[in-house]
Image (cartoon, rainbow, N blue to C red):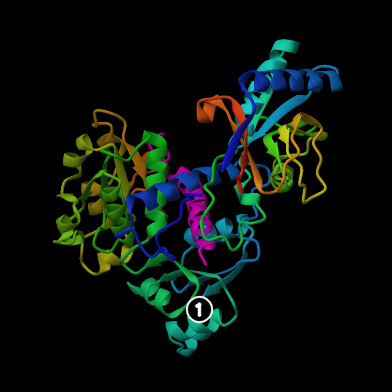
Amino acid sequence: MNRMQVIDEDGIRRSVMRLAHEVVEKFRGAERIVLVGIRKRGDHLAARLARAIEEIEGKKIDVGFLDITLYRDDLRGRLDHPELKSTEILFNIDGKILILVDDVLYTGRTIRAALDALADIGRPSSIQLLVLIDRGHRELPIKADFVGKNLPTSSTQQIEVHLKEVDGEDAAYLIDLEGS
Amino acid sequence: MGSPKLQGRHLLGLDGISKEDIVMILDTAKSFREVLDRPIKKVPPLQGKTIVNLFFESSTRTRISFELAERRLSADVVNFAASGSSVSKGETLKDTARNIEAMKIDMVVIRHSSPGSAHFLSRVVDANVINAGDGEHEHPTQALLDMYTLREKYGTLEGLRVCIVGDITHSRVARSNIFGLRTMGAEVSVCGPATLIPHDIEALGAKVYHRIEDIIPRVDALNVLRIQLERQQSGLFPSLREYHRYFGVTIDRISKAPKPITILHPGPINRDVEISADVADSEHSVILEQVTNGVAIRMAVLYLLGSTN
């Protein structure tokens, strides 16, 4: 197994900063913008982005956290149970511009599940997808609106994002499962 | 992935269930509790599963609670009530169950007046079986929702002092609570007239009190059981008025406690028999929270068992 760092701590900090700027530029400010991060790393990214946007715009941004376990399409016939974490969206998302945040975009199935979950919670005027890393290999017609870094990978590789809040460090690794 | 999983395929009782399993159910219920506050109170994990509610004994809130939990997990639900069914034509439980199972169902929720009926059913059908009360034996989801409500209020069950008051002998709620609370490290006692307390209850680890004034200063919570009117006819206590006089939970009595006491009741309540109306409606009472939490607990149990096939 071969493991290579592809983004370091500074890289993640710069990406978050740039993505925050891109979001406020696209929507000309932070009016109506709310962030929702997918557990369990997108939630921390969303919290960081919110702080960055608050710094740029000087305005408080609502941040929510979404657990998509109940909406997974591979739940049926599973032998083990994906652990349920809690969804915490303590504000109204109706009519808002909702930025959905995740660490890695891969097959798109997580995002599909997140869209279903959001539909049960409310009706934002628009949902935008923001990811730290897009590694390709989509299995569904889903595309990110804001991307930190495009990383072309093969399907025998894995991307691991580490965040201080969960893993004690900020970094992203490319792992070769068929390592040579 | 090291994902959690319950030990068994059924939930038949809390006797022998591990602490890890109880914690998993309570934690999972917390996630479902949030779903119940959403505008759309429905999530998809049991889509395509069929659940039969086999109620051989009358029940309003448990049946509605289970049915809501099932529907909120997107399961297909079939209700069966003993009256007006083939049971009144003399069919046995085994035959009823096998016939229903031949219709390809995934889970069975059973309420029956015979202790052990849920265990029996789990041996004759392939579906997951959930005990919704079997005679005087166990009522696990009620005890789980009681524990959930207490854990929400106090943060932990470890060391919590809980007394179950009333007819312990005939109560499946009492038994399941004693098993579950003891496993979670709580201190459990029971209180009631000697005629309504089994003589061997101390073997389950519950201390016995016969005067409610003695227990009130020593507990954090009272779980007050319903007094069934037919027990008076069988001579176990002289009258409802006398029961209320000696064992009724009144504001007067609970205000003697050094710190506020939480009052639970599995319902339906007999106002001014086992509990006075002012207590039931006071800030001490968590009776309605129990009802809401009951749906979340049942969703958690159904969800955790529902994909073990």
Q: Quadrant of the N terminus of chain A?
A: top right
Instruction: Answer with the quarter of the image where residue B282 lies.
Output: top left
- From which residue to which does the magenta span run? B281-309
Q: Amino acid at mark 1?
A: Ser
Instruction: Answer with the quarter of the image where residue A132 lies.
Output: top right
Question: Percent from the top left, x then y, of residue B249?
Answer: 29, 43
Q: Residues within 10 Å of mark 1 (few under 14, many from 20)?
A: few
Q: Observer-nearest residue: B199 or B2?
A: B2
Say whether residue B83 is magenta. Answer: no
For disc 1, the marked residue is: B83
Q: How many numbered discs sit on the rendered protein?
A: 1
B190 left or right of B250 in image: left
A159 left or right of B131 in image: right
Identify the secondary structure beneath mark 1: loop
Q: Quadrant of the C terminus of chain A?
A: top right
Question: Percent from the top left, x then y, of residue B290?
Answer: 45, 46
